[in-house]
Image: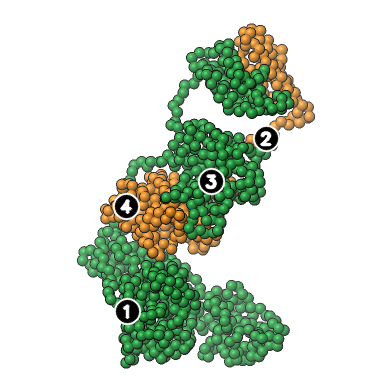
Chain colours: A green, B orange
Amino acid sequence: MKAPYSWIKELVDISISPEELADRLSLCGAEADAKPFLEGNFDNVVIGSVVELEPIENSDHLRKAIVDDGHEKFQVVCGAPNVAKGQKIILAKIGAELKGGFKIKQAKLRGIESFGMICSETELGISDDHSGIMVLDDDASLGENPIEYLKLNDTILHLDLTPNRPDLLSLIGVARDISCLFDTKIIRPQFEVKESAETADEYIKVSIDDPDACPRYAARVIKNIKIGPSPWWIKRKLLLSGVRPISNIVDITNLVMLEMGHPLHAFDYDFLGSKEIVVRRALNKEKFTTLDNKEHELTPDVLLITNGEKAVAAAGVMGGLNSEVQATTSTVLLEAAYFNPVTIRKSKNILGINSESSHRFERGADPNIVCQVLDRAASLMAEYAGSEILSGIVDCYPNTIEPAKLTLRPERVNALMGTNISKERMIKILEGIEFGVKDKGTLEVVVPTFTADVTREVDLIEEIIRIEGFNSVPESIHNSGPLFTPRHADDNFYDSSRNVMTSLGFDEMYSPGMADAKLLSKVSGDEPQLKVLNPIADDLTVMHNSLFYSLLKAVSHNISHRNVNLQLFDMGRIYLPGNPPYEEEKIGLTVTGKADDHWYNKGRIFDFYDLKGAVDSFLRLSHILPIDYIPTKHFSLDDSCSFELQLNNKTIGYAGQIKQKIAKQFDVKQNVFAAMLDFRLLLESIQPESIFKSLPRFPAAPRDLAVIVDETVEVGSLMDEISQSGGLLLEKVELFDLFTGTQVGYGKKSIAFSMIYRSWEKSLESDEISKIHKNIADNLNKKFKAQIREA
Amino acid sequence: MPDIKDIGVLLAEAESAISMANSPDDLEAISIKYLGRKGQITAVLRSLKEVPIDQRKELGAATNKARVKLEQELKEAAEKFSKGDKKANFDPTLPGVSHRIGAIHPITKVLKQVNQSFERMGFEIAKGPEIESDYYNFEGLNFPPDHPARDMQDTFYVEGDMLLRTHTSPVQVRTLKNSKPPVKIIAPGKNFRNEAISSRAYYTFYQIEGFLVDEGVSMADLKGVLNAFCRDFFGEGLKLRYRPSFFPFTEPSAEVDITCFLCGSKGCRLCKHTGWLEILGCGMIDPNVLENADYDSEKYTGFAFGMGIERVTMLKYMIDDIRLFYNNDIRFIRQFI
C-alpha cells in the first residue's frame, strides 16, 4: 500500500515530517517506509512550448522541434508520436539527471543536433508509460519547474501490511490510525449526490443465488457519460499511489477504492445485454474471459456476476472483457458489493489473479460502507464525466451484518500485558480508532465492520497495545516453572557426536534435504523416494533418501573448487515415503583424497581404513561397543568394499567405497569412502558409564609374535584365535606390523602382534607365559598354517 | 636382575637424550653412559648369564636390538654435527606437529549458543518431525484454511497428504498437548519454505521457537526473557524495539528489532540505514492455540517467540549469501573452526 504524504495531510491535520510519521506508524502496526516519489535532479527540467516542428530527412518517426522555455529556444530531436506544435511540454535540458541516473547530454541524431529531451512519464519516473510525451495544460507557465507545477514533489509512505489489517488498505484507514496517535480528527471529503428523476430500479434488478458468498450487492446507474481523461488532480493521486490512470470513469472507481478502501466496478450498461444482475457460482468448466483478455475455465469455487445468463465479472476479482467500459460508453452500472473473504480467496486462486480488489476482499472489506462508496463515486462521475445519476441505489442485502459487540475487562488488558494502563486511556484509544465504547464497569465495545479481524477480547487488547505502544510494557521475570530443566539424551548425543567427529578431523556439513530424482536413484537405486508435490525446481523434486547423495554433492562441490582432500560428516535426516511418510536421523561421514602433507610426515592417501578408523573411534568415544563389518551387497557401495555394520547382530549402518560409476555421476573421479549410521539405534546402544577398575597390582609381561601366513588369511580371524587361545591371562593383543614382499615370499604376508600377559592374582612366571605363547603359536599354525617367525 | 621392560625404558631415555644433544661432546657422554664399558646397556648384556636360561635368549635379543638401534642413532646425530650446523636438528620456527581438527558448521555454533542461553533460563529443548500434517503446522496454530495468513509461509507439500513444516511452531502444539503447565520449552529445528533461491532466501532454514505457558504469564515476562537473551547473545548495551505485527498463533504479536551493532544504530548498509536490525517475532499465545491444546485460556496465558538462525548467523558473522550454509564449501565451513 502506497500512501502519498500530501493525500494523508488532506485527511488529517498533522505537522510532522513524513519520515517521523513512517517511524510512528511502524511502531503501531503498519510497517512504513517514507521515500520520495521522484528521484533525480530536476534543476534543468522546465516547462516549454513546442514552437516549431518539422520532419527529419531519412527518418520516419524522428522530428526536429524548437522548444521555447520563455527565455531561450532549444533545438530538440523528438521521436514521440504525439508531439505537436503549440503543446506545453516538459523539457529536460542538458545537465538534467533523470530517473535511474539518466543524464541528458548534447547529442546528434541523423545529423541534427539535439540540446535536450522532451520527456515522457517514464523518464521522469512518474509511471512506466512511455507511449508518448507528457502534454501539459495550457495554463502551465513557461520556464516553471514542472514537478512543482504538477505537485509531484511528494513523499510516499510505503506500507508493508500484515493480513490482519484490511482497515489500513485505504487512505482514510491510515488517517484513522494517525488521528488516534496524534489525537486529532479525520477530515472526510465532502460531497453531494444530485439524482435525476429517473430511477435506477427501472434499469436493473439484482438477485443473489448464494448470500453466504455475496452477502450484499448494491449498484447505481449513471447515464449520459462522456468518457475522457480525468482531471490532473485525480490522475495525480493515482500516479502517486502507483495506479495508472485510464479514463475518468475507471479512474474514479480506483480513486474511491484508494480513498475509502472498498473496491468498485463499472460495467458498460449497454453491453450487459439484460436488465438484471444475478450473482451465482460458476458452472463446472464454464468459460469466462477477464478484461485482461485471458480466457479461464472455471469451477463452482468461482463466484460470478452475470446478466442472468452469461458472466460479466468474476466477483471481487476482475471484470469481464464483454462489459468493460470503453471510449464509447454512455451508461454505466456501478457496482459496490461485499463478498465473503474465503470465496474470493478460492476464486482468485483458481483464476490465478491477484487484483487490488481481490486483495481487499480476501482480507475483509466493510459490508456497511457500500452505499457511501457508490455515492462518493457517483458524485465524482457527475462532476468529472458530465453524467446524470439515476435515482436510488439498487441494494440487495438480505441479512444485515451487524457490528460485533464485545466485552473488555480493563484488568485483563493489564494482566495480559503486564502494564498499568488506565480505563480512561483505553476508552480514548478505542474511540480514537472509531470503536463504540460504553463504560459499564467493564467496557461494552462496538466493533465497526471495517475491522474484520477484531472478534474477541484479546483482539481489543491488541488494538489498545499497538496504539499505546510496546514501549509502555515493562520488563519483568516470570518466577515459576520447573526448578530443574531436563536435558534429553538425544540432545547430548548430538552435541557429543559433533565434538567427537570434529576431534577426529571431520568438518561438519549440512545437507539441504532435497534432491534430483534421477540422480538420487543413481545413488540409492530403487529405494522409494518421497516426492515433493510442488517442487521449487526441476532438479529438486524429491527428498533425499540417503545421506550418500548429499555427501557426494558436497564432495563434488568442493572438488570443483579444487579442494580434493575432504573429511566431512553430516548429522542429517533422510525422508521416506509411507503412510504417513517418515524421516530417520542419520550420521553420514565421508573421506576422500589424502591427508594433509607436513614437513615431518607426508600425508597418506585415504583408504577404507581411514573411514573404518573414524567409525570405530567415533563409536568408542561415544561409549558404544565395537561393531562387526559384515561384507554385503549395497547399491551405493562397491562390492569389493561394502559392509553392513552390525552391533550385537543388529544393523546400525553401512560403510564402504562408493561405486566409482556413482561418483562419476557427480563428476567425482577419485575414490570416495562413506558410511551412514543410524542415529537412534546408536543412541540406544550407548553403554552406561563403567565403574572404576582397580589398577593392576602385578606386572605386565609383553611378548611379540610374528607369523607368516597366506595373503588370503584375514587378520581379524588370527586375532580372534589369539584371544581365544590366550585365555584370561592374555590382557591385550595388538597388530603392530604388516608387510608383504620378497623376504616373506610370493602370496604370503608377515604379521606381527604385540601381546600383554598379566594375572590379577600373582606375578606370572616366565615359563607360564611361554607355555601360553607357544600354545597360541601352535594353534595359529594348526588352523592357519602360520609359520612362526623368530625374532 | 634385569627385566625386558627395563630395556625399553633405557632405550627411550637414551633416545630422548640424543634429541636434546647440543654438541658432539654431549653425544659422546650419552654413548659412554649407555654403551661404554660401564654403560647401562652393556651392564645388562654382562648380567645375562645370571638370567634363567629360558628368559636369557629373549632378553639378550631385545638388548642387542636396543644396542644396535642406539649406535645407529648416535652415528646419525654425529653426522649432523659434523656438517658444521650444530643446531641442525632443531629449528624452533618449524610448525609444530599438527592434528587435524574438523570445523563445526556455523549454524550448529549459533544454535548451540542460543540453546545454551535459553537453557540457562530454564527452558527445555523439545523437537519434532520435519514432515508434518496441516493440523500441527497450520490449523492447530490458528491458521484457518483459506486465510491470507497462509500466504505468509509458502509451503512444500509432499505425498501422503503431508507437508514440510514451515516453522518449528508445530512443536508448540505437540508439546502443549502432552504437558501440564508450567511449560517452558525451546524448539530448535529445520524447516522448509517454497521460496525462490537467492542470496537472501533458501528453501530450507533453521529456526528456534520458544514458549512459556503458565498462570499469570504476561507480555512483560516475554520482554524480560527476550531482553535477557539479546543481551546475552548480542552483547550488553544494545537496545530493543518491539513493533506490533501479526502472526496467527499470537495475539498481540510483535517483531523485535535490536540496535545495529555494526554502526551503533547510526545507519549503515547492514541495517539498511534504519539503525535497527529485525531479529525475531513474538507475542502472547493466541487463546485459540491454547484451547486447541485443551488449556483453559482464561486461567493460563503464555508467550511464544521465533527466531531465524541463518539470519542471526549472517548478522553475527556478516555473511552475505545464505546459500553458503548449504553448499558445504570447506573454505566457508573451516572459517568457523
Q: Chain of mark 1?
A: A
Q: Nearer the viewer, mark 2 or mark 3?
A: 3
Q: Are marks 2 and 3 on the same chain?
A: yes
The image quadrant where one finds the N terminus of chain A is bottom left
Label located before the other in sequence (1 or 3): 1
Relative height, residue A578 to residue A782 (above, below) = below
Q: List the residue tagged with mark 4.
A: B293
Count neighbours of disc 4 (C-alpha within 10 A) and say few if under 14, some if 14 to 19, many if 20 or more: many
Badge 1 marks a residue whose secondary structure is strand
Is residue B21 found left or right of A398 in the rendered image?
Answer: right
The amino acid type, in three-letter code, at marker 4 is: Ala
Q: Is residue A637 visible?
A: yes
Q: Which residue is mark 1?
A: A207
The earlier-in-sequence mark between 2 and 1 is 1
Q: CA distance from mark 1 to mark 3?
A: 61 Å
The image shows residue A327 at horizontal and vertical percentages of 48, 87
Q: Evaluate whether residue B189 shows in this view.
A: no
Q: Looking at the picture, do discs 2 and 1 lie on one chain?
A: yes
Q: Which residue is mark 3?
A: A547
Question: What residue is shown at x 66% (from left), y 48% (from top)?
Answer: A562
Judged by depth in the image, the label closer to the viewer, 4 or 1, is: 1
Secondary element at tag 3: helix
Q: Describe the element under mark 2 as helix, strand or loop.
A: loop
Residue beneath disc 2: A601
Q: Which comes before the other along the chain, label 2 or label 3?
A: 3
Q: Nearer the viewer, residue A86 or A703?
A: A703
Q: Are marks 4 and 1 on the same chain?
A: no
Residue nearer the viewer, B127 or B80? B127
Residue found at x 42% / y 55%: B161
